Image (cartoon, coloured by chain):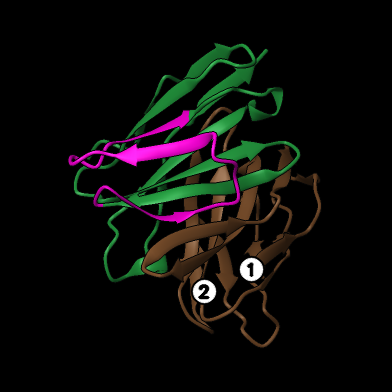
Amino acid sequence: GNSVTQMEGPVTLSEEAFLTINCTYTATGYPSLFWYVQYPGEGLQLLLKATKADDKGSNKGFEATYRKETTSFHLEKGSVQVSDSAVYFCALGLTQGGSEKLVFGKGTKLTVNP
Amino acid sequence: KAGVTQTPRYLIKTRGQQVTLSCSPISGHRSVSWYQQTPGQGLQFLFEYFSETQRNKGNFPGRFSGRQFSNSRSEMNVSTLELGDSALYLCASSPGGLAGARNEQFFGPGTRLTVL
């Protein structure tokens, strides 16, 4: 089946530290891959996406590369800020009979301390 | 452009009651999806509507239903509420069309349902 595995949290870092959140997936066909972020009390916001193998998505200093050979889409940021504290979700985007569907990982809670 | 709006933001119901949640997508978006978020199960897909037709449904009991109107607004209904239905219900919209899953889905703030 289709599934996403994310590294377990929570993750606690100091400001300006390097961030990696691992994400691997199992999917049939050619999914798109997304990272969404959820701040307390809010819905999900798209952080970045990649729609085919070797694509690199980037936004606000975050990056992730769609690796088909390792079925991975790891999120990285070189220097985190307190404002990056949130829950991060890796997701597969699937097209099934014309329909769009997202399959999410469990989420990784990130806390950045000053 | 206004974002995805969901009403109400908070609901408290008792077991056995039914509830209707509403979602207004971004103007011009024709696809609306619903997701349930709980601490135990995470984010799970409920269903997706496009041009008033349900195109896909997740693995939820028949108590969960939805519909979409001609202006793309959508409602979901949960009948005979159970304690386990307590969750954040998120609505997402996208343009739909040929780009399919390459489209970004834009999420609303959610409706927090508490079943007592």
Image quadrant containing the C terminus of chain B? top right
Which residue of the protein is positioned furthest toward the bottom in this rendering? Answer: A69
Q: Which residue lies at the image location 18% right of the left edge and 41% below the top edge?
A: B70
Q: Nearer the viewer, residue B67 or B23?
A: B67
B17 and B74: which is toward the camera = B17
Does label 2 lie on the same chain as label 1? yes
Numbered disc 1: secondary structure: loop
Q: Which residues are magenta?
A: B51-77
- Of badges 1 and 2, the one in the foreground is 1
* Quarter of the N terminus of chain B within the rendering: top left
Q: Chain of mark 2?
A: A
Residue A15 seen in this snapshot: no
Residue A84 on the magenta segment: no
Where is residue B68 drawn, in percent x and y? 29, 41
* Label disc, if present, on residue A31 of the rendered structure: 2
- Kindly indicate whether the residue at mark 2 contacts the one at mark 1 (C-beta within 8 angstroms): yes
Quadrant of the rendered image containing residue A69: bottom right
Q: Which mark is residue B46?
A: none
Q: Which mark is residue A2?
A: 1
Residue nearest the viewer, comparing B116 with A53: B116
Q: Which chain is green?
A: B
| Residue at the spot 42% in from the left edge and 61% down from the top edge | A100
Count residues near mark 1 (Cα–Cα under 10 Å), then give few for <14, some for 14-19, many for 20+: few
**Which of disc 2 and disc 1 is earlier in sequence?**
1
Q: Nearer the viewer, residue A20 or A31?
A: A31
The colour chain A appears in is brown
Q: CA distance from mark 1 to mark 2?
A: 10 Å
